[in-house]
Amino acid sequence: MTDSSSMTPIPVGLDDGYAFTKIALPDGRLIAIPSRGRIGQSGVTWVHQGQQRIFEYETEGTVYSVGAVDGEATNFEGYPMSGLNRSIVQHVLQEAGLAGRTVHAVSGLPVSTFYRKNGQLRQGTIDKKRDSLKIAARPMPETLPAGIAFHDVIPEALAAWYDYVITEKAGEAKLDAERLSTPVAIVDIGGRTTDYVVVKDQGIVHASSGSLQCGMLDVKQLVANAIEDRFDLENLGEQLIAQAVDKKAVRLHGKDYDITGLVDAAKQEVVERLHAETRKQLGLGVELDQVLFVGGGTVALAEHIADWFPNQAIAEHPAFANARGMLKYLRYVCEASNAA
Ligand SMILES: Nc1ncnc2c1ncn2[C@@H]1O[C@H](COP(=O)(O)OP(=O)(O)OP(=O)(O)O)[C@@H](O)[C@H]1O
Ligand SMILES: [Mg+2]
């Protein structure tokens, strides 16, 4: 394709979390894939291309497999700057049909990775993340990569605030003056971290903002430990555990076992930690006009968090609130992308 429309960069909101990689596209599409992959080739030959479930990418001389693999945990400090992250991001762009296209992207970092507690930027980390995703990741074999030509990084939960204050109607974006002037807290319950951001008078209140290292991946870990204990097993695969949490049942040796009790207990334990931290960060929320819950954990824990604040709300498609906000930030705030 050489027509001019295929040359125009595509703006993408790119929420490359530890559990799921979510993107928001200007045509309204929202796409998520599990952040699941590992170093090395898959060692599987696909007889029918259409059934391919593992995809390989090469970046900086290393090959990664992404898709239906029992992945290495993304749950490590350097993940946002890693080749594994680049390969998973490239995969979601391929899934969105952006092979061969130039992409402008905004992604995020957890609040406490982005800011020091005193509000200073952790510029070195931010630069590393920004540069990492501009390094090429090539699909193997031979498909054209999507190339990220422009990339900016914002704090994850703040992205959801942009989603909240910038509203789009009939293709027109506008700043919601009322929402802009009200003090609001965003609570983003993710996989590895739960992020807090309080915005007042269009500024971040750093004393009430930050990240707790606790989220839905902890639920998965607790369930994994409990299953291994109960059935006297070890090293169960990550995909098996993920399914067990979703279905509250586990299939072992061809037989299904109900584990509703285990899953509920694990959720309860994580909810209690989240509740304590939320109270610590936000108090009773009396000075806040709104507490907005976002992130995939908000869906998974909906019934447990329903009555934390009288003035709370759950964002629409909460798992995609950050990705939508990143896209809005890119399109309506980022000057560089307008100038490009
Ligand atoms: N629609 C859904 N229904 C039930 N659970 C969901 C749904 N979407 C996501 N989740 C759960 O929420 C968890 C967190 O998802 P999310 O996409 O917010 O994490 P993340 O952004 O990748 O993590 P982090 O922000 O820590 O990097 C997932 O592990 C998943 O189990
Ligand atoms: Mg997240």
Image: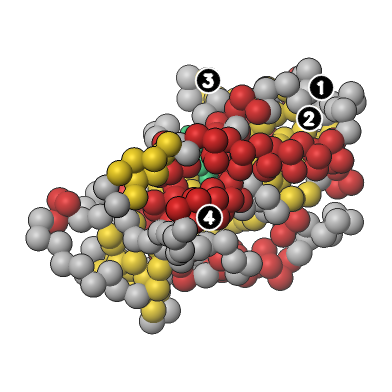
As drawn, which residue projects farthest toward the bottom? Answer: 61
Q: Mark 3 to mark 1: distance in Å? A: 24 Å
Which residue corresponds to mark 2? 184
Which residue corresponds to mark 1? 289
Q: Give the structural element (helix, strand or loop) at label 4.
A: helix
Task: Give the mark toward the camera: 1 or 4.
Answer: 4
* Above/below status of 241 relative to 276: below
Label for residue 229? 4
The answer to whether mark 3 and mark 1 are in CB contact below 8 A is no
Q: Mark 2 to mark 4: distance in Å? A: 43 Å
Mark earlier in primary sequence (1, 2): 2
Mark earlier in primary sequence (3, 4): 3
The 10 Å Cα crowd at callout 2, few under 14, some 14 to 19, many 20 or more, is: many
Q: Give the structural element (helix, strand or loop) at label 1.
A: loop
Label for residue 162? none
* Above/below status of 65 relative to 310: below
Q: Amino acid at mark 4?
A: Asp
Tally of numbered tags: 4
**Location of residue 151 (image quadrant):** bottom right
